[in-house]
Amino acid sequence: MTMLYIGRPIILPLIFSLIIAVVLHPVVRLFARRKLPRVAAIAIVLFLSFVVIAGLGNAPVYQASRFSQSLPTLVENLTRLINQAIAWRPNVWASTRRASTTGSPAQGWTHPHQQRRDRADLVTLGSGVVTLTLIPCTSS
């Protein structure tokens, strides 16, 4: 086990190069069958694989930069939506006491059926908030 730890800087690149060779070999063979010299086929396949890897690496960076540019707008929209929700159902947010079977509406008591409707409204509101935050901002 110690030998594997000591040899890790050598073994890992060898394993990765073996995997890359196994994956790219059929493409090299395809070019070689098309009467292309083997060295040229290897060079072309390596170049194409680097281009693909660079393209795949560039996509998350591009998306992250677009997200960081649209984040202030998303936060503003989410804050506005939450403020509208608070204004829409003030009794849900203002009530801190649990409902009991004794008490009157003046004491902050709400009927259990009304509480279920309030919870359902909050779930619907939460689903809307999640949907709005997942929709990308297309304004530029």
Image (tube, grey):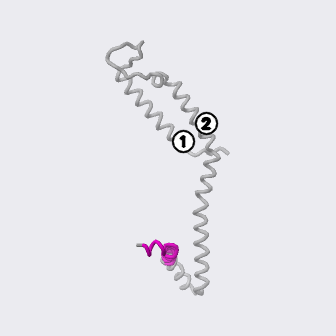
Relative height, residue 75 to residue 15 (above, below):
above
Residue at image point 41% right, 14% down: 107
Quarter of the image for residue 44 reads bottom right
Q: Main secondary structure of the magenta part?
A: helix
Residue 119: quarter of image: top left
In the image, what residue occupies the spot 59% across and 82% down? 41
Left or right: residue 83 compared with residue 118: right
Task: Examine the rendered structure and indicate whether residue 60 appears above or below residue 82.
Answer: below
SS at mark 2 in the image: helix
**Residue annotated with mark 2:** 76
From the top left corner, tell me how far across and down residue 64 is, in percent.
60, 52
Q: Residue 80 appears at what percent x and percent y?
A: 58, 32
What residue do we see at 47% from left, 22% from top?
94
Type of amino acid under label 2: Glu
Q: How many marks?
A: 2
Range of magenta residues: 2-21
> Tag 1, which secondary structure?
helix
Q: Determine crowd level at label 2: few under 14, some 14-19, many 20+ residues with C-alpha closer than 10 A.
A: few
Q: Residue 133, how many percent across, how many down?
A: 54, 42
In this view, the residue in front, 14 or 116, is 14
Q: Quadrant of the N terminus?
A: bottom left
Q: Does 59 appear in magenta?
A: no
- Decide whether residue 20 is among the magenta residues: yes
Q: Is residue 136 above or below residue 89?
A: below
To which residue does mark 1 refer? 133
Farthest right residue in view: 140
- Name the amino acid type tagged 1: Thr
Left of 29 or right of it: where is 138?
Answer: right
